[in-house]
Amino acid sequence: MRGQSSKKRKYYFFDYLFWLGEMAWWHYKGEPRRPDGESMLMLCIMIFIYEPIFFTTAHFLYDSPVFEWFAVAMIAGSVAILHCIWRGWIYPFSRREAVMQHYEGRRFSPFRCYFFVFSLGFLMIAEAYLLPSTLMRIDGHKAEPVEDTRTKVPQRWRDYLALHITVGARQEVPSEALQYLINQDSRTSRYGQPVYVMQVREEDMGGEFRAGLLNHATFDEIQDDSRKFVECTWVKGYTPDSIRVLLTGWYEVRNAELCPVDSLEWTEDTDFLKLQKYEKNPNKKTSFISPDCDDT
């Protein structure tokens, strides 16, 4: 039965290295600084498992706090693996006995043993140099320190969040036709894309900020969408105290056109209970497609 089970086993290169290490230990009668089977196994693990994982991770996470914790985990893992090999949890003792029986009768060569030891050592050093260099060439640049691992909120999104809290702005995605009309606006050409675009609805009419629209439509018309108004806000500039100056424009949608009905220039620190309109000309109604908008 033992002979049949041994025939079914498959033996690999690391099995041969383990046998060489064990035979070297017996040959030199346990002298210090001599290889043994466990050290040969650990050398294989370092070359073929640990080094590829370590240097690949270092390439992408170099000098970041995450990498520091990973390096500590790798060191602790190597100690744990060495302990598992010593206890026989990795590469069990039954496997070791089968390997020694499989290579029994072969002549041990100290020259061959040290040839493999120094070859593996050279391979470890070469891998430490070649693997990072290869990753740099594949990636196209050297591994640079990660200066900040925190998620940064884009400035445009932060601007919108401030307006959402201040005036209840919503970031709605305009249709292609509406976006085209907004792009043709002289304010967009002057100040860039608006911070947000939204349709004014019933729930938006509770404060002073949009009260001017009631000069152009009733609350019921806004509620039932029989009159549709679009609101856009641009960042116009900054005060000497670095407070943002904002320009909000309201447009009525008529016959696939945008007709300006009201606008308001204000600053972030404005008290909307005392809000005064800087720019208001409800009689002036122009289209971004044609010069005039009909009231019908």
Image (cartoon, rainbow, N blue to C red):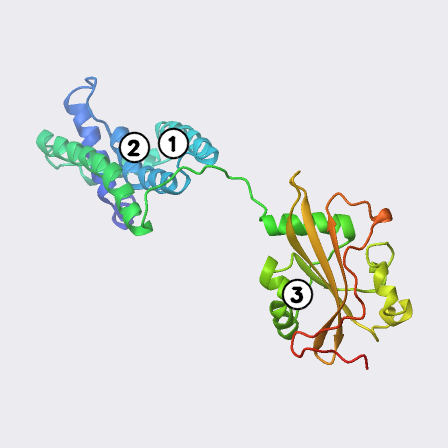
Instruction: Choose between 180 and 74: the one closer to the eye.
Output: 180
The mark found on residue 173 in the picture is 3
Residue 47 horizontal/vertical position (percent) = 27, 38
Relative side of 64 to 197, left or right = left
Viewer-proximal residue, 257 or 264? 264
Residue 81 is marked as 1
Classed neighbour count for the residue bearing mark 2: other residues with Cα under 10 Å, few (<14), some (14–19), many (≥20): some
Disc 3 to disc 2: CB gap under 8 Å:
no
Q: Position of residue 242 (x, y in %)?
A: 64, 40
User: For the image shown, how many numbered marks are present on the structure?
Assistant: 3
In the rendering, at what x and y percent does residue 11 appear? Answer: 25, 45
Q: Is mark 3 on a helix, strand or loop?
A: loop
Q: Earlier in the sequence, mark 2 or mark 1?
A: 2
Q: Are the residues at dot 2 and dot 1 in contact (C-beta closer than 8 Å)? A: yes
Determine which residue is flagged by label 2. Answer: 42
In the image, 167 versus 266, the foreground residue is 266
- Residue in the image at 17% along x and 27% along y: 24
